[in-house]
Every structure is written in C-alpha cells, then in structure tokens.
Amino acid sequence: MADVSIRKVFKRYDSVEAVRGIDLEIKDHEFVVLVGPSGCGKSTTLRMIAGLEEITAGEIAIDDIVVNDVPPKDRDIAMVFQNYALYPHMTVAENMSFGLRLKRFPKPEIKARVDEAARILDITELLDRKPKALSGGQRQRVAMGRAIVRHPKVFLFDEPLSNLDAKLRVQMRTEIKRVHQKVKTTTVYVTHDQVEAMTLADRVVVMNHGVIEQVGPPNELYHAPLTKFVAGFIGSPAMNFIPCKLEDAGDGLRVRLTGDYAFPVPQARVARYRPHLASPNLLFGVRPEHVAESRPHAEPGIHPFEVGLDVTEPMGMETLVYFKVNGAEVCGRVSPTAGAADNARMRLAIDMNNMHLIDDATGMVL
C-alpha cells in the first residue's frame, strides 16, 4: 500500500504538450479517478505512473520513492487494461498466477493467492476455464484477479469497462467498488465516463488539455465546480449555460436572461457577485434538476416562469423538457405527471439557490 505523488509533471511529444505541469497527491488506500475528454492527458498520466511512458519533466513518487528511472516491473504496481490481455491458451487460474510463477513464488502461496482472489471476485467456479469460454464481464474479473494476486502497492485501471455493454458496465462498476472495499489498495482509475467517475471515486480529478481543472469528492465537483469546463463536464444531462447580465435591484441583484426573464440573486450571494455588475461576458449556470415544474407553494429562492417547450423526452421516472432562452437551449427535469408536451407552453420554476455565475472570458465560476 502506498501514496502516489505527481509533482510538476510534463509530457511532450515533439511540439505537442500532452501533460502540462500537473501536481497531484494520492493518499494510501484512496480510489482516485482521472476523468476528461479524449486527448486531455489522463491515459498518458496513468502510463507515466506505470512507467510505460517516460516523463519529460517533473517527478513521480510511489511510497515516497521517486520512480522516474525505475522500470515498470520494479514499481510494484498492477495494471488492468481495456482489452483484458489474457493468454488464450491458459486457464483462468494460469492467467491469474502467471506473474507469480515468473517470480518463482512457492506453489502453495500461488494457489492460496489465486483462491483468495477468485473468492473475492466470485469466479472460483471459472478457474479451470479458458478465456474463450468466458463472457466479457468474466474476462474483466480475471484481469482484475491477475492484478489482485500480486498484492501490489498501487492498482492502475485504464478504461477497463469501455468494451462492455451498458448493463454490464453498471454491474462491473459495483464489482470494482466492492473489490476496493475489500482489498483497500491505492487505486488510480482512468475513464472518459463521468458517471463512472462519480460512482467509483473517493476523489475525482478532472483533466482538460493536459492540466488538472479541479480535484475533489464527487459531490463537491457536482455542486461547487470551479470552472465552466468542470460544471459542463460533470453531470448528465449537462449544466445549462445561458448568457445573462447582472442588474442592481435596490439592496439586491437580479440576473436578467432576456427582456422577459429576470430572477433575484439569493441574498447570501449578493456581496460575492456585486463586483461583477459591469462584466460583459457572464453566463448563468443551472442544472436541469433545478428547472422543474412550478408548484403551488414554492420554497424561498424558487421562482416561477412560463415558457414554450420545443421537445420533451419521457424517461419513465422523469421527463426531460427542452426550450430556448436567449439563444441557448435549456434542459429541465419535470415529473412524468406534470403534463409536459412537445410544442406546448408550460409553467416551470427555477431554483436560484443552486445557480452558478460564470465569467465566460476566463471560464471561472464566480
């Protein structure tokens, strides 16, 4: 078990800077997920931790030992790949024990480790099968088992669920979380799927264009994003962004979206937002769940308005409604019994207690 420290790490490919001076401290036993769009540098970062990519500048330490020049086999890490990488001619037990046999572990210890990992992953009955006789999810468990038997200091997962169908991905997310609760090994997990990141991580690291935008627990990133990118990337459907202006309203402030729509800023935020009254590039951010059907007795900070819907998407437990405000498409979430219909008018309510104000020029949440 070990901490992982990434200090001022750069990775350049000729003139392309894939990772640009990132700093990250991962604690012992922690499950950290690196998430971001394709090309953001997350897989490159993972491969540098593993030793599969050389570092251009900076240093990486595992258990307080700098490993920049340590070959992958000596870093005491185990990696689970997207494509499983199982040997087709070996049984499950042989695949799981291969690394231990290479290191000439005693046969009784190898058997004990394989049996324990198989028990944790619930694949005991599969030990004599070969990979061709396994489903995708079973192969993924075998790949995890091969990592677990080594008792490494750090687990590295490189988009391990991207080859699975939607239902199996949900099941395997649960399996991975359950295994981490039992094994408690420091884990670094890479994915482009923000739902995976939110459900698995102790802390999420959001990357964009080779830099870290924000690090924090899933709920913190969801409810208190620091940048427009994080606000828009975390959450599905994504946060709505509407061009707006701040206006004086006596002792308070108003957010004006259009000539028809202006909503009072919660009093607790007035002092924070007042210095930005003259800012020309403001965006109003609100998540779809904070745009819902209007109710007779609204709580403080929730304000009704009427709008013409463009499209509705019934989802069973909820209905997504889409409409335009000030040229921006807005998504709301309403009850399936609220009567939403395509091309109909509907009375909605916006929860200003959960609004965000963003400076579009800098991309920062104010």
Image (cartoon, rainbow, N blue to C red):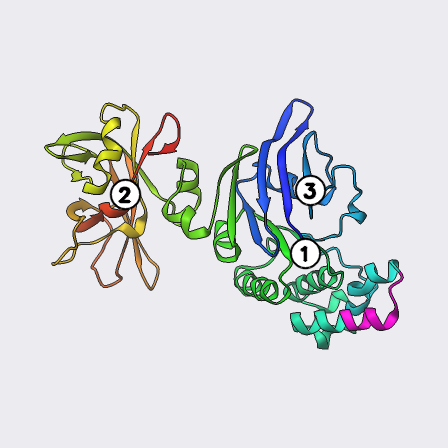
Label at residue 355: 2
Instruction: Name the residue furthest front.
Output: 64
Q: In this picture, which residue range is highlighted in magenta?
A: 104-113
**As displayed, is residue 363 above or below residue 158?**
above
Where on the picture, by quarter, is residue 250? top left
Looking at the picture, tell me which residue is in the foreground, 71 or 38.
Answer: 71
- Residue found 54% across the figure and 32% down from its top: 209
- Observer-nearest residue: 348 or 45? 45
Q: Give me the C-alpha separation between circle 2 and circle 1.
A: 41 Å
Q: Which residue is mark 3?
A: 61
| Residue type marked 1 | Met
Amino acid at circle 3: Ala
Q: Is residue 129 visible?
A: no
> Which residue does the image show at 53% across and 39% down from the upper left?
207
Residue 175 visible in the shown view? yes
Q: Is residue 346 above or below residue 278?
A: below
| Residue 152 percent location from the top left of the image | 73, 57
- In the picture, the disc for residue 1 is 1
Query: Which numbered dot is residue 238?
Result: none
The outermost residue toward the left is 250
Alpha carbon separation for disc pair 3 and 1? 13 Å
Nearer the N terminus, badge 3 or badge 1?
Answer: 1
- Mark 1 Cα-neighbour bin, 10 Å: few <14, some 14–19, many ≥20: many
Q: Quarter of the image holding residue 38?
A: top right
